Amino acid sequence: MNDDELIYRRVLHAPRELVWRCLTEPAELAQFWGPSGMTTPFDGIVVELRPGGRFETLMLGEHGSHRMIATFTDVVAPERLGWVEPASGMHTTSTLNDLGDGTTEVVIHQRHVPEPMRRPEARAGFLTSLDKLEQHLAHRLQGDRS
């Protein structure tokens, strides 16, 4: 791994197909996308789920907003999702590994990560976005049982 790479791993207590939907459907993304303290309104999300398609999010927080503009590079449902952010050159690949027991390991590999996003506080913020995904999945699974 190079100095400008980051890898995050998380085991989620949800089936891979549900995790995939949450990562690729705007209505789902709007429920959790972004670090703690930020929201992502539905109308600020664009998902053209195909290689070459757009992936855009607008995250809003107390201290301002952040727009991510990316292009999908890899779409293999429900296993792998990749995109590149042209402004920074950062590549993100999310791999969803079905662990066979109703859980999914998510491995997020980021390459060419800008220096500010490699700082400990930025990495901690990214981990809170995985916490939000985990909470959203738990809520979705509770709702599916009723």
Image (cartoon, rainbow, N blue to C red):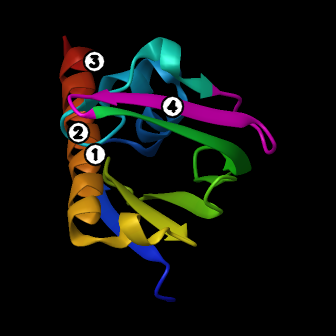
Q: Label 3 belongs to which residue?
A: 144
Q: Earlier in the sequence, mark 3 or mark 1?
A: 1
Q: Amino acid at mark 4?
A: Thr
Q: Earlier in the sequence, mark 4 or mark 1?
A: 4
Q: Which one is in front in this view, the residue at disc 3 or the one at disc 2?
A: 2
Q: Position of residue 95 (x, y in %)?
A: 52, 60
State how far apart marks 3 and 4 are (Cα).
27 Å
In this picture, residue 16 sits left or right of residue 136: right
Counting other residues with Cα less than 10 Å from the Cα at mark 1, is it few (<14), some (14-19), or many (20 or more)? some
Mark 3 belongs to which amino acid?
Answer: Asp
Per the image, the residue denoted by label 4 is 57
Q: Give the spatial CA distance, label 3 vs label 1.
A: 22 Å
Residue at x-position 59% and y-position 62%: 90
- For residue 146, side relative to residue 126 (left or right): left
Secondary structure beneath label 3? helix
**Residue where numbered disc 2 is placed:** 132
Q: Which residue is mark 1?
A: 129
> Could you say where residue 139 lies in the image, as x and y percent from the top left?
20, 25
112 vs 72: above or below: below
Residue in view at x 56 percent, y 59 percent: 92
**As displayed, is residue 42 above or below residue 9?**
above
Q: Which residues are magenta?
A: 47-63
Residue kind at label 1, given as amino acid type:
Ser
